[in-house]
Structures are given as C-alpha cells and as structure tokens.
Image (cartoon, rainbow, N blue to C red):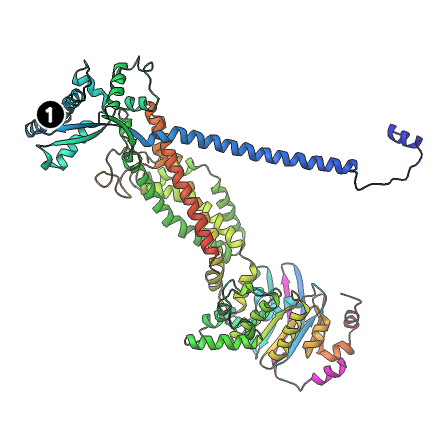
Amino acid sequence: MDDLRLTERSVDQKEIKISASNVQVYYGETHAIRDVSVEIEDKTVTAFIGPSGCGKSTFLRCINRMNDTIDTARVSGDILIDGEDIYDKRVDPVQLRAKVGMVFQKPNPFPKSIYDNVAYGPRIHGLARNKADLDDIVERALRRGAIWNEVKDRLTAPGTGLSGGQQQRLCIARAVATEPEVLLMDEPCSALDPIATGQVEELIDELRESYSVVIVTHSMQQAARVSQKTAFFHLGNMVEFGETGKIFTNPEDSRTESYISGRIG
Amino acid sequence: MTDASAASAAAPPAVRKSSLHQLDARTKKRNASEARFKAYGLGAVLIGVAFLVALLYAIISNGTPAFTQTFVTVEVPLEPEAVEAAEASFVKTSAYREIIYTALAERLAEAGIETDMGPEELGQILSSSEAGQMREFVLANPDRVGGTVEFRFFASSRVDGYSKGRVTRESLARDNNLSAAHLDLVDRMEAAGIVERSFNWDFIFGADASDSRPEQAGIGVAMLGSLFMMFVVLFLALPIGVAASIYLEEFAPRNRWTDLIEVNISNLAAVPSIVFGILGLAAFIQFGGLPQSAPLVGGLVLTLMTLPTIIISTRASLQSVPPSIRAAALGVGASKMQSVFHHVLPLAMPGILTGTIIGLAQALGETAPLLLIGMVGYIATNYPDGVASGFLDPNSAMPAQIYEWAKRADPAFYERAWGGIIILLLFLMTMNIVAILLRRRFERRW
C-alpha cells in the first residue's frame, strides 16, 4: 500500500530551487560536512535522514546561513538559490533569511502575544501597509499554519501559553508570514506527541503547494510519509539522494539499506 | 583474617533476611549524616539571623534617639531698640543672646521656678545656636519686630542627653558646660512645659553643625549630595554599562582581546573601592582639574566603581535569555540588532534593572573613595541658600557624613551617626524594594 502511494506521488520534474555543490563545513578542526552536492526542487518536500551527528542539521543550517552565527563554523562550496550564490559577498544573510524561513526543533515562540509572534516578521520587513493589512497577513499565516481556528479568539494571549503542538504550528505560521520561498524544518516534530505530529505532517504536505520544503527528521516513517525526495546522510557525507519511494524500497547504497532496515544508526 | 570474619565463620551461615521495618547499619549512618548536615545548615542560618537581629537592635536602639530632640520654648519680646542695638554691635549674636537669656529668666520667674542662677549661667541650658536662630528670624521677618515671638530653641546637647539618659548628674561632675543644678532646673522646666522632647525634622533635612553643637546637626545636605551623585552614576553607569555588555555579549568576536577585557572587568569588580578613590583623585581632580568635594567627581568615581557590577549582572541576564529566542528572531529574518533590541533586551530587562539598582545601592553606601576626593565637605547652611546646591559645589554624602559624626568626640554625635545609618538603610531598603517591584512589573508584561 505504502509503496503504491509513494510512487504515485513521484511527480514530474520540477524546476530546481536550491542547488548545492561540493559543500564543506568545518567546526574548528572538525570536518562536519564532506563534499555534499544536492539539487532541491521547488514545490517539493525534501527530507534529510540519517543517524545523529551525521551533519543533516548542519547542512540545513547552511541553506539560510544560520551557521554564520557560530564563530568557529566555516563553509566552503556553492549553494545557489534560484541560481544566485547565497555565500556571495553581496548577499546579506538577513535578507536571505527572510526568503528562507526556518522552523526549529523545539517550538520557540517569542514571549509575546500570538498576534505579535506572527506579525513580527511582516513588521520588520515592512510587508504590511497598515493595521488592516497586517491583520490580514496574520490571519492568512495562522490559517496556513492550520492553527487559526484554535487561536482566533485569543490572539492577544501569550504564544508561550499554547500546547507544544500548537506552539510548533504557531512557529510555522510565523515562518510563512514573511512569505518565504523555501521553508527549512529542523526536526519539527521531535518535541511533539503523535497527534500533534500528525497535524504538523498534514500541514507540511499542504505547504508543499507553495514552498520548497526541506525537513530534517529522525523518523524514517515521517520522511516516508511527507517527502517526495529523500537524502540520506552518514558521517558528514551525503550517501544517497533520490525519490523517497526508491530510497525506502530499493536503495542503491548498502549503508542506506542498513540504516533503513535498522542495522546502523 | 579479622575478628569479625572469624566470628562469622564460627556462626552457622544464616540466610540474610532483611526487613523493611528495620534500618540496616548503612541506612542509619546515611540518615544520621543527613540529619547532621541539616542541623549544620540550620545552625548556620540561625547564627546569621541572630547576627542580623543583633545588628538591627543595635542600630535601632542607638539610632532612634537621634530623631527626637529636646526643645526649650521661650517667648522673646523683640523690642525695636534692642534689636537695633544688637544689629549695631560688633558681635551681633552675643547681643541677641543676652535678650534670649533675659527672656528665659523671665519665663522661669513667670512659671514660678526659683533659681539663684544668673541669666548667663541659665543660658547654658540652651544650645549655642539660639542667637543665630533668632537673628535669622528677625532678618527674615522684620515686620514682627515690636511684638513678642515664641521661639523653640534647641536645648544644649547635655540637656538633650539628660532626657535621653546619656547624661547623668554623676557624669556632669567634671563637665564645665553644665552642672547638676542645671539638671534639677531642667526637671522643673519640663514639669512647667518649658522644656519638651519632640520629633526633630531638622535632623533629616538640616545641615551639619560644628563640633560644639551636635544638637543642631542634620543629614539633609549630605542626602542632597548623595542624590546628586546617584544622578551622575545612574546617567553614566547605566547606558555605558548596558551598551558595553550588549556589545561584548552579542556582537564582539570571541578572541584574545575580548577575553582580556572580560577578565579585567571581573577583576575590576573586586578592586577595593579606595583604589577607585585614588584614581578619581589623580584623574578627575589633579589631571582633569575638576573641583574637590564636588558631587560630579564623587559620581564619576562611583560610576567607575559601579560599572563592573552593572556589566557583569547585565551580561549574566543577557546570557540567561534562551538562545532559541535569538535563533527564532534570526530565523524570521531579523537582523542581529533587531533580535537583540526586540527580543533579548526586553527579556533581560528585569535582570539589568536589578543589577543596576543593586550597583547604585552599593555606590550609595560607599565611603572610602569619597574620603579621598574630599566628599566630606562641612556645609552648615541648607539648600537652596547654601553652597551645596549643584553638581560642582562642595558637598558631603550620607556615608561620609556618618563617618564624620562617628569620628567626633561628643557622644551626641555618635547617636547621630547611628541615626544617619537608619536613614541610609531606609534608602537602601527602598531601592531594593523598587528593584523587586520593577522586576515583577517587567516580568508580568507577557
């Protein structure tokens, strides 16, 4: 059954959104990412899987240059978004991050109201012309975050007062409020219970219609459920990248097969 | 082989059955050591509380008398000729004094108190500030000349001490200023309502007085000096300290230089305050040419001293803001500065404010550096007529004033030193309460 669904979802070739070639990341002396090249398509969910410490999160954080905030981190190689090198000197990481939104492992709403959480990004990027406009943006983002119905009556309540799953959907709403083109998700469900996880996964599937979504996950089932493309990372190398259905049913590399079947990891 | 094992070898190898209702030796030992530790801790707390109680008792019992003072109420006729003659004489106050003494003698006769003391001897009951007080009144209210005015003069510090139990007839045996006969007289005057003890606002709002008139001395001017200094400290140390901490914590690269700066800031926090006093003397007064005894210089020195405290507490509260908040802000495309000013700083605010107020309180109670830059000005006139009216005018500060009083010989000043400590402690307590309230307020905002 699953297999059928997976192959069914493998859609036609789409345009390439993110193209990385020969990316190396060093933390001080440690060589964390070795020579990773990958092409991520638009309007697709791409999952990065692999055992802990394999570098999947590190690579994800290269895509919006969050690694810049770590003093010892060094990145070489090229990462292009829409053909533009994001590590070019002319690129301001702040502008890049408005274009590449990020959702973190632990829900991290600002200690402000639900409304202000979502409105913050649009405010600092000047996306709203007036209050009504901002209200619209907030409502749209919360609807897309599939949390509108739960919070519409208490937008002024603190975001930190929501449950874990609601907080994470709020964070997703916050990320989409700035109209990004790419959405990075770093293990977005690892702090959530199965019900909340299900809601977030459903949401990710919907977000695919508008964004290129890259998700790092520990759960292979999750990768199989939400992604169209999967990359398997091991010890800083990207071992295999391809259609999710193919990776899970007929991997080319023996390491991938061992991981999928639970022998390493 | 030890004895124990030899004994057990002799006994039949019984199956060890442990009962939960019986503590084994190890558990007993563990429980005993835990109970011992708890007792030590409780003992330590009790010792601390005992010291605190003893301290508060000493301060309150020694200091409260300073807030009351013995007054002598005398109706003095202001005859125009007498006033004119007094103003024309060379030592004007001694002429006024004669008027007062005569009035006092008349007041006693009126009350039916018989005494064989002359006016001069009688006058020793009064503080020597009386003539000045009267002359000031006459100069300020020339239209009252010709009538009779009721004055409340300070009693001399010996008489005041007698009413507070500090001075006894025996202790006056070798005192030239007052005799046992005076005290008998005071008793009768008190019965007649001429002498009374009441709350003395002049102690809180008044100026310092010379060695011979402790009854007149007040801490008001020193309070003003402390206030000026605190303004300087607040407006310099807070912005400089917070800006430095934010830069060091959020923006500065981690390298040898920032490490060096960090170590030095921590070291500066431990530098004895008198060193800052010498530094201030050399840098601000001798090199910078600023005046001595000025609250501005005092404030600058205390700023130097307070900065490390503020920087350390501000950095600690910035560090305590979870990194996930910074990541969240950066993740939606906020710049570094936006993430700091919109998210990190508001969260760190309660800690910063608490640190600042504690730094200010520390500065308020600091004495040693003030002695070195001469913040022990003797100011005998109160604001706004006196010289202590600005940031550059000589002034004193509360702790320096307390030190000055404690240094003087007359026990009446000793009592005032304790009283000054009460006022200083009230200020410190107020500041700490404000710190707590601010903290609560800011934390409740979300």
Q: Is residue A50 left or right of residue B281?
A: right
Residue located beneath label 1 in the image:
B90
- Residue occupying image coordinates x 49% and y 76%: A137
What quarter of the picture does the N terminus of chain A occupy? bottom right
- Residue situated in front as seen by the camera: B113 or A131: B113
Against B114, is A229 above or below? Answer: below
Task: Specify the subunit that label 1 lies on.
Answer: B
- Counting from the top left corner in percent of width and height, residue B352 is at 46, 51
- Counting from the top left corner in percent of width and height, residue B83 is at 9, 29
Query: Toward which corner of the image does residue B361 lie, by quadrant?
Result: top left
Q: Amino acid at mark 1?
A: Phe
- Counting from the top left corner in percent of width and height, residue A129 is at 41, 77
Against B308, is B85 above or below? Answer: above
- Residue situated in front as seen by the camera: B99 or A138: B99
Against B410, is B428 above or below? Answer: below
- Indicate yes or no whether the magenta region holds residue A188: no
Residue B241 shows in this picture: yes
What quarter of the picture does the C terminus of chain A occupy? bottom right
Over which residues does the magenta segment extend? Answer: A1-27
Pointer 1 local density, CA inside 10 Å: few below 14, some 14–19, many at least 20: few
- Residue occupying image coordinates x 43% and y 77%: A132
Q: Look at the numbered disc 1 and give the secondary structure of its residue.
A: loop
- Residue occupying image coordinates x 16% and y 22%: B110
Query: Toward which corner of the image does residue A252 lie, by quadrant?
Result: bottom right
